[in-house]
Image: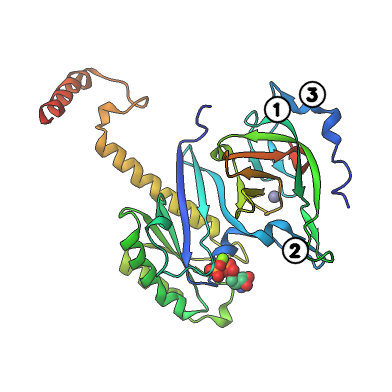
Amino acid sequence: MAKTYDYLFKLLLIGDSGVGKTSILFRFSEDAFNISFISTIGIDFKIRTIDLDGKKVKLQIWDTAGQERFRTITTAYYRGSMGIMLVYDVTNEKSFENIKNWIRNIEENASADVEKMILGNKCDLDAKRQVSKEQGEKLAIEYQIKFVETSAKDSLNVEYAFYTLARDIKAKMEKKQEASNPPGNRSGVHTLNDTDRKRQPTSWLARCSVL
Amino acid sequence: MSEFENTDKTGDSQSELIEDGCNKLVVKCKYCGSKILDKKLGKFIMQEKELPLMQQDTRKEGEIQNEKVDQFYHVENMFTFENIGFTHTVDCYKYLSCADCDAGPVGYYDMNTKHSYVALSRIEHA
Ligand SMILES: Nc1nc2c(ncn2[C@@H]2O[C@H](COP(=O)(O)OP(=O)(O)OP(=O)(O)O)[C@@H](O)[C@H]2O)c(=O)[nH]1
Ligand SMILES: [Mg+2]
Ligand SMILES: [Zn+2]
């Protein structure tokens, strides 16, 4: 069957236990007498389709299991993931301090060009806050990673965060494609003009002589 | 409960829903309308399967209440779905849920074949 999308990005939610990773992925509310079979078993991952500048992008978003700590998350865990959401809880200072450990773990185990974003979750709990927004921003600048405060409870900024991360991955990929594929060579978009036609064999020959 | 009514509605109106062996209409979540599968991307098949009810009665502790379902859309590649959730694995299966409101199971995923099956009775056509 023909491919029904332009890009497929695997994303991972990472962070200390209790920061709200599962809540960011899962929204079900239930009443007193009925419990959803789905919430009993739990969600492993979700597939979402979004539109980015006219391109159909599939996001496969993975939760990480509750007991996992950065010491135990290794290469196998990160395999294939192109984006990572680093989540801390604004009402839990320890989870914020641990973001540095998570980043180190990613640097040691994930692919070097994985795109990252920091989420300060539970920003609806202002009275219990232990980490200010400024602290979050400062950390993000230090590591040159994008940052936003979220509330999984109120669905605040969650969608925005996924769009932002996906857009950054797409931009990085397109840049790479352009670098490995000189403008005249791109399929579909570009029709050859005379100079291109003359240039093409030369660049092809140039590449051959390198081999 | 409405779970038990109307489940066979699809039997009579199959020709309105199926075209060339596939779903003629968009498959959406019954509860929130989230788009699950685009037109013509699921192959209609008949097979009898036990599927856990979407609402489990907590007063019947420790047992999972199932019902028999026999009409499905077969989807070979999981990335064909528009929006969908996959549960953790239970006995070689993952269950499918709405990506927006988490209602489910709307079907299941077979870990051995890596194929997905969406129950017609658990979704809405639009
Ligand atoms: N007020 C508020 N509570 C939240 C928010 N996000 C999560 N919670 C609550 O925080 C608790 C922990 O959330 P989880 O989503 O289970 O946390 P987790 O990161 O998945 O934890 P582990 O699975 O143990 O790693 C739950 O009681 C949630 O209801 C939020 O944005 N606001
Ligand atoms: Mg969790
Ligand atoms: Zn839904």
B55 over A147 or under it: above or below? above
The residue indicated by pointer 2 is A30
For residue A59, say whether it is visible: yes
Asked if labels 1 and 3 share a chain, the reply is: yes
The residue indicated by pointer 1 is B24
In the image, which disc is placed on residue B15?
3
Q: Is mark 1 within 8 Å of ligand 3?
A: no
Quadrant holding the C terminus of chain A: top left
- Crowding at dot 3, Cα within 10 Å, few <14 / some 14-19 / many 20+, comes out as few
As drawn, is A60 to the left or to the right of A175?
right
- Crowding at dot 1, Cα within 10 Å, few <14 / some 14-19 / many 20+, comes out as some
State the residue at coordinates (26%, 31%).
A183
Q: Amino acid at mark 2?
A: Glu
Residue B26 position, x and y percent, is: 68, 34
A57 over A134 or under it: above or below? above
As drawn, is A99 to the left or to the right of A180?
right
In the image, B84 versus B87, the foreground residue is: B87
Mark-to-mark CA distance, 1 and 3: 9 Å
- Determine the quadrant in which ligand 1 lies: bottom right
Quadrant of the image occupied by residue B68: top right
The chain identifier of the residue carrying mark 3 reads: B
Residue A133 position, x and y percent, is: 45, 74
Asked if labels 3 and 2 share a chain, the reply is: no
In the image, B50 versus B104, the foreground residue is: B50
